[in-house]
Amino acid sequence: MDIPRFGIPEKLAARMSMAEQHAYLRTRPTRRGVLRAGVATAAVTGTGLAARPVQAAPTVLTAPRASTRVDGSLVAPFGRHLAYGADPRTRMSVGWQVPFAVERPFLRIGLQPWALSRRIDAEVRHLTTPELNGGKIAAAEQFYLHARLERLRPGTTYYYGVGHEGFDPADARNLGTLGTFTTAPERAEPFTFTAFGDQGVSYDALGNDQLILGQGPAFHLHAGDLCYADPFGSGRPIDGYDARTWDQYLAQTETVAKTVPWMVTTGNHDMEAWYSPDGYGGQNARWSLPGNGPDPVNLPGAYSFVHGNVAVVALDANDVSYEIPANFGISDGRQTRWLDRRLGELRAHHDIDFVVVFFHHCAFSTSSVHASDGGVRDAWVPLFEKHRVDLVVNGHNHVYERTDAILNGAVRRTVPIGERVDPARDGIVYVTAGGGGRALMRFAVPDSYEGHPAERESVDTFHTVRGGGRAAETVEWSRVRYTGFSFLAVAVEPGRHPRMEVSALAESGERIDHFEIARG
């Protein structure tokens, strides 16, 4: 049956790109008539600053109603989350949320909690979502605030607080709301970073957050599918979308993200057709990322940064995915050309020992649900091999899986648990770290992880081909498999013989995999 979803017939939605869906939603009435609450918009609230635009096309619908202001002393900020700027040594972004419109929001920062002498005005990004699904999902007004910090000292810990008229974090009664962050060092030092994807809102997601905080990471990589406000993730305006899930997610994540830069990229569940032609208006409202990629507005999840001797490149795999094509080709090849150029620049930098790339859709996985995306293999794997990337981290499949060292689509060297690999000689190890907290998926063969040896070397699986079909394949590169909630912790040791010790930790804290990456 061709059931309308948010006013778009199912068969029609299946053929529409994100841009076409967005245009349809903005110009056609829902079952309940005109979207009285309006469409996704960005507006300045209580500040003279110009808001960073949430990209939107002209609309024929009515504008959103004016937001109600309340006494600022009764409004507490929440959902603080950090992100590195383009230079993590000197730049940091702080984002947060308030439940109502407030006057003159700001951030205070200093080197001691009692000396928050520097005050920075905050930018407001106001997101309005209409009543959806015939009124079953209420309209939502969300107020996201952002402060970009520059000219910071490398390797320095700062205290900060966020506030607005009526709520000053410098007041003694509010000192408990302060957060801290530490900028990247001027020169390479030992550090740890963590990574996972596919988090959502759950006790398991919260538990992983607390374990990550215990690792003391310098930063965290989130490989996409953040909160699942759209639980279907097919790039269509499915009737389960609820923008309020973001409120729960940011509140859940604050315990770690207020201290650890939370470096996110874009998964298929993060495409939200209500916001902007390509579904990224919501992401632009909620996050302030480095913005140094091929297109900061239309591809906010593509960027790079360097911490010590490790370069990190984030990519938006919706651009190349054969499996979920709603945003296929949105960059017209610009992202892939930028990737080639950027990897070359990073490899030429004498202070960078390791290059880590992370994105959502898997190049190599054997999970029964998504397995491998041929679009990623065709577009990007040749570039990873050309520039000898050291580690690739993905999500999408809600499991943990780690390959042997792969080169030219085949195993160049087996990498048993505890072994060392040299990407310059042996090929690249690909890690699926999709056990961040969302409901788990399964493998077609038994798990194989630390203390649980593999029962077989080959796995019958598939990869998605252009057009969305599945091509069967039998592979021998699936070295470690674990069906459980988990995350990566990567300990980096610079020096004459630099190395990265990569460990996978289960929700219980148990180590399920480890291996070492060392060049030369």
Image: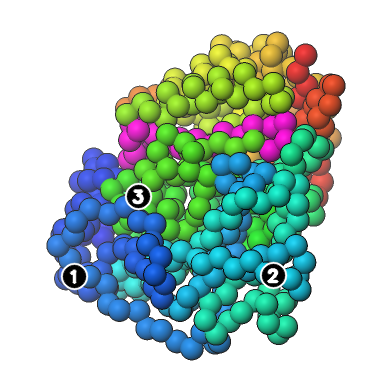
Examine the rendered structure and indicate whether residue 352 appears above or below residue 57: above
Residue 285 occupies quadrant:
bottom left
Amino acid type of disc 1?
Thr
Amino acid type of disc 2?
Leu
Residue 505 occupies quadrant:
top right
Closer to the camera, 416 or 104? 104
Q: Is disc 1 in contact with disc 3, using a CB cutoff of under 8 Å?
A: no
Question: Residue 116: which numbered mark, if any?
Answer: 2
In 3D space, how far apart are the residues under numbered discs 2 and 3 (Cα atoms)? Answer: 38 Å
**Foreground: disc 1 or disc 3:** 1
Instruction: Give the magenta part as a residue range.
Output: 307-331
Amino acid type of disc 3?
Gly
- Please report the residue visible at 31 percent of the width from the left and 57 percent of the height from the top: 274
- Please report the residue visible at 67 percent of the width from the left and 69 percent of the height from the top: 117
Residue bearing mark 3: 279
Closer to the camera, 161 or 419? 161
Q: Position of residue 513 (x, y in %)?
A: 77, 35
Residue bearing mark 1: 62
